Image (cartoon, rainbow, N blue to C red):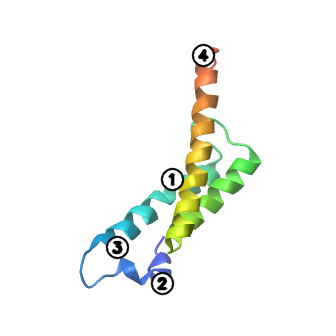
Amino acid sequence: MPFMFVYTPMLMPKGFNAEVAYTWVFLFLSALPYGAGAVGYLLAPLTKIERVLLIAAGCGMAFPGMMSNLVGAGVFLAILGRQRIAARGTQLRGVT
């Protein structure tokens, strides 16, 4: 993610403040949906649509702007919730 230093000058601050912390948190969290989409597995195997949505969510969370961060996080949390239900159903059926 070194290219994000070009898109987000906030990552090279002259001082640390809440805006810098917010940017860092979303940038680091953006690796979770992006990585899961690239690998194809979160808590259970992902469908092709979920993979595309997770990669888009990761990109949205990485780019600066509160709206793109919140939309990306919302998509990630929605898919994570569906994945929890899918993983729980697999465990209840005894499939490992």
| Mark 2 or mark 3: whose residue is earlier in sequence | 2
Q: Residues within 10 Å of mark 3 (few under 14, many from 20)?
A: few
Return the residue found at the far right. Answer: 48
- Left or right for 38, reference 69: right
From the image, tell me which residue sits under label 2.
6
- Left or right for 52, reference 43: right
Q: CA distance from mark 1 to mark 4?
A: 26 Å
| Mark 4 or mark 2: whose residue is earlier in sequence | 2
Place of residue 70 in the rendered image (x, y in percent of width and height, measured from the top left): 53, 61
Q: Is residue 64 above or below residue 40?
A: below
SS at badge 4: helix
| Mark 3 or mark 4: whose residue is earlier in sequence | 3
Q: Amino acid at mark 2?
A: Val
Q: Residues within 10 Å of mark 1 (few under 14, many from 20)?
A: some
Q: CA distance from mark 1 to mark 3?
A: 21 Å
The tag on residue 92 is 4
Q: CA distance from mark 4 to mark 2?
A: 47 Å
SS at badge 3: helix
- Left or right for 48, reference 60: right
From the image, tell me which residue sits under label 3.
19
Return the residue found at the far left. Answer: 15
Residue ID at (55%, 68%):
67
Q: Quadrant of the C terminus?
A: top right
Q: Amino acid at mark 1?
A: Leu
Which is in the foreground here, disc 2 or disc 3?
A: 3
Place of residue 84 in the rendered image (x, y in percent of width and height, measured from the top left): 57, 33
Asked if marks 1 and 3 touch (Cβ < 8 Å), the reply is no
The tag on residue 69 is none
| Mark 1 or mark 4: whose residue is earlier in sequence | 1
Residue 44 or 16: which is nearer the viewer?
Answer: 16
Asked if marks 4 and 2 touch (Cβ < 8 Å), the reply is no
From the image, tell me which residue sits under label 1.
32
